[in-house]
């Protein structure tokens, strides 16, 4: 996460899930975005093999652990430039609809920082993981 912007930062969470982050700042400044969901369009047979599923459904790309599993991402990709050929983010011209901003999930240990509106999603999209907390929950 302290690497150069535009690189991958992947870590193992709870000893079982690889979580893929995109480093978004300059070297030595820990800013990154966790990739929480994907909508598979290509490579679905390979993703099914990796996830052990028989057919595709929204859970294949829902949640950061499932994203890495479906895409075959492990800590071996940490530090890779996302402008390379092994792991990259491409612009296909898709225009994202209005995004919903909400509080983060799964980071209760972060105290009041867990309530920062740093979670962005497409409202109602099937690849979005559990709904954000509402005030008081």
Image (cartoon, rainbow, N blue to C red):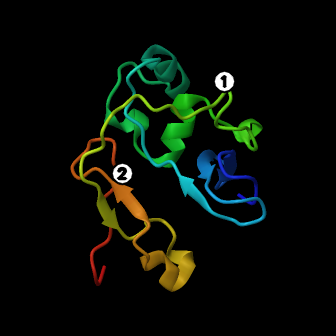
Residue pointed to by mark 2: 129
Q: In which quarter of the image is residue 100?
A: bottom left
Front tag of 2 and 1: 1
Within the image, what quadrant is residue 54 found in?
top left
Q: Residue furthest left?
A: 124
Q: Is residue 36 left or right of residue 7?
A: left
Judge the density around disc 1: few (<14), some (14-19), many (≥20) Cα neighbours within 10 Å: few
- Label 2 neighbour load within 10 Å: few <14, some 14-19, many 20+: some
Task: Please give left or right for residue 119 compared with residue 18 in the image.
Answer: left
At horizontal 30% and vertical 39% (from top left) the residue drawn is 95
Q: Where is residue 128 in the image (x, y as percent from the top left)?
A: 33, 48
Expressed as whole percent of the image width and height from the top left, the position of residue 97 reads 24, 46
Question: Looking at the image, which is closer to me, 74 or 24?
Answer: 24
SS of the residue under disc 1: loop
The residue that disc 1 covers is 85
Query: In 3D space, how far apart are the residues under numbered discs 2 and 1 (Cα atoms)?
Result: 28 Å
Please tell me which residue lies in front, 126 or 102: 102
| x and y percentages locating residue 118 in the rendered image | 44, 67
Residue that extends furthest to the top in the rendered view of this protein:
45
Compared with 63, 114 (above or below) is below
Q: Residue sitting at 34 percent across and 67 percent down?
A: 102
The count of marks equals 2
As helix, strand or loop, the secondary structure at mark 2 comes to: loop
Q: In which quarter of the image is residue 87?
A: top right
Residue 70 position, x and y percent, is: 51, 30
Seen at 71% across and 38% down, the residue is: 81
């Amino acid at each position: 996460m302290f690497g150069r912007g535009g690189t991958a930062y992947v870590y193992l969470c709870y000893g079982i899930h690889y979580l893929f982050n995109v480093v978004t700042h300059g070297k030595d400044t820990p800013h990154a975005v966790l990739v929480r969901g994907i909508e598979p369009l290509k490579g679905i047979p390979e993703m099914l093999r990796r996830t052990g599923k028989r057919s595709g459904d929204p859970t294949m790309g829902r949640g950061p652990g499932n994203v890495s599993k479906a895409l075959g991402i492990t800590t071996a990709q940490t530090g890779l430039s996302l402008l390379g050929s092994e792991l990259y983010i491409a612009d296909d011209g898709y225009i994202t609809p209005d995004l919903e901003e909400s509080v983060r999930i799964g980071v209760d240990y972060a105290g009041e920082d867990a309530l920062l509106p740093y979670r962005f999603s497409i409202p109602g999209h099937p690849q979005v993981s559990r709904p954000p907390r509402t005030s008081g929950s």
